[in-house]
Amino acid sequence: MYFFYAYAKLYDMDIELNERSRIPDMLKIAGMAIAVIILLLLLVRCFFRLPVRDYYKSSRKVFEIPDIGNGYIAQGISYDDSSDMFFLTGYMKDSSASPIYIVSREDGALKKSLHLNDSAGNPLVIHAGGLTAHGDYIYVAGNLGDNLYVFDKNEALNAEDGAGINCLGTYNVRLSDNDYVEIAFTTVCDGKLYIGEFFRQENYPTPLSHHITTPGGDENTALMVGIPFSTDEGSLFGLSDKPAEAYSIPSLAQGACFKDNKIYLSTSYALAFSNVYVYNDMKKTGSTINVLDTEVPLYFLDSSTLFKTLKLPPMSEEIEIVGDEMFTQCESASDKYIFGKITGGKYIYATRITTEDQ
């Protein structure tokens, strides 16, 4: 019996020694796994930052995109000079009401977070691809669709943090199934609100009449239409009922700005690096186009008017120019796409526009 007892004790000791010997091996494996994860994160960061290092070198962080870690997917940005505030909008991952954030230009502080309601006070859930704060109103692009949702700017500025603001109404730009503008972004210049389209063959179509062979031989697939601000009879929410001009633009457009006879067009889709195309706004044309039941002059943003191309990180959205700086934002750091959280995508950046750009 003693023999069997001694053998059992030795067996237990051997198991205990083997288990103890496994601990360093397990620690080594855990350490290697952590090292591999860190290496992968570094590789991802390098992959998305090194090709656009010139952009980061010439840019400064302005402020962190609000709620970027709480489900907000950034889309639109607009600067309102009367209040010295930035207005931001987009949509929420959980399909709750689309937000508007008001941020101070002076110090980058978030002044308030608001949510959008429809005219009846119900939560308004839209893609909110872009917005413009101008005059008495905030104009918000809908679900890559054919409505501008209009809100009272002063109501937004005076609202309590966390409040909802009701839509005043919509400005319709679908006159028929063949005559409409698929609004994806907005901007303002020279007394006009411009509404622009985003085209991608597979999932974001535009009217066939907007597919045009340009003077440079390019195949443009979208329009950016200028609607004058007006208080005349027939106007609605400060906008004329007729457009004044249109630009033929390339696909994948996310936003646009005008500055010193140049037009800056932000383009992006998925993980590909973004481009901001800078065009000479030459306004030379012998062409017209019928859009929204109105014959208007047609201008072209194509290879014949392209001045230069600025390469940006993936998923750039609307842009805004204030003074001599271009403000850019990306949706890559949102909880929907994530990778931008380790590549610097959670910030609004300001890039100085050099004399070469102008």
Image (cartoon, grey):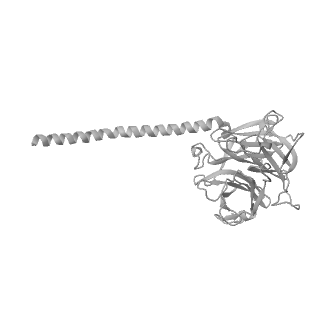
Q: Return the residue nearer the eye: 349 or 60.
A: 349
Q: How many marks?
A: 0
Left/right placement of residue 344 relative to residue 279 reads left
Residue extending furthest front?
Answer: 177
Which quadrant does the N terminus fall into? top left
Q: Return the residue nearer the eye: 58 or 234.
A: 234
Q: Is residue 45 visible?
A: yes
Residue sitting at x 76%, y 51%: 186
Q: Position of residue 293 (x, y in %)?
A: 85, 51
Q: Classify residue 357 by image quadrant.
A: top right
Q: Position of residue 204 (x, y in %)?
A: 70, 45
Left/right placement of residue 12 relative to residue 358 reads left
Q: Return the residue nearer the eye: 66 or 294.
A: 294
Residue extending furthest left?
Answer: 1
Q: Return the residue nearer the eye: 9 or 357.
A: 9
Q: Position of residue 128 (x, y in %)?
A: 69, 54
Q: Classify residue 131 by image quadrant.
A: bottom right
Q: Classify residue 15 by image quadrant.
A: top left
Which quadrant does the C terminus fall into? top right
Residue sitting at x 83%, y 46%: 246
Q: Is residue 354 visible?
A: no
